[in-house]
Image (cartoon, helix red, strand yellow):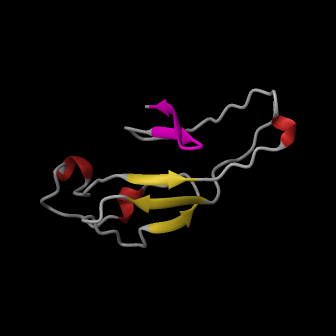
Amino acid sequence: MFRQNFNLQWQFMLIDPSIKLNENTNVLLNLPHDFSIGLKRDAHSKSGAHNGYFQGGIGTYEKKLFVPKEWKDKTVILEFEGVYMNTIVRFNHQIVAIH
């Protein structure tokens, strides 16, 4: 079995423009990453103290995967650890997994 680190060079974007990040909303980063830590705290947030007064929101993480010819006719497994909730994984714009 061959393992490849897939945690580097992800493109992150926050979807909800009403939420203000303390950092740029379209950034290149490495995983693991918690975008809510970059959100401004708000005493009136929906989750209140249960979520540390962070606003929450929806973010996307995108990465291009180059598949070499040697992988043809082989089983390739992508393992995502620490994915939060309501996750959709797409491959070539097709949904392949939902959590």
Residue appearing at x 17%, y 52% in the figure? 48
Front one among 22 and 12? 12
Residue furthest to the right? 70
Q: Nearer the viewer, residue 47 or 49?
A: 47
Q: In the image, is residue 54 above or below residue 93?
A: below
x%, y% of residue 51?
25, 50
Q: What percent of the width, then of the height, locates residue 71?
A: 82, 35
**Main secondary structure of the magenta stretch:** strand
Q: Quadrant of residue 73?
A: top right
Nearer-the-camera pick, 32 or 58: 58
Place of residue 47 in the rendered image (x, y in percent of width and height, measured from the top left): 19, 48
The residues colored magenta run 88-98
Q: Is residue 23 above or below residue 2?
A: below
Could you tell me which residue is drawn at 75 percent across and 26 percent down? 75
Asked if the magenta segment contains residue 54, the reply would be no
Specify the farthest residue to the left.
Answer: 44
Residue 36 in picture, x, y percent from top left: 35, 57
Q: How many marks?
A: 0
**Residue 99: which quarter of the image?**
top left
> At x 68% / y 31%, what residue is drawn?
77
Q: Residue at x 45, y 53 (%)?
A: 60
* 88 left or right of 92 in image: left
Quadrant of the frame with the N terminus: top right
Quadrant position of residue 9: bottom right
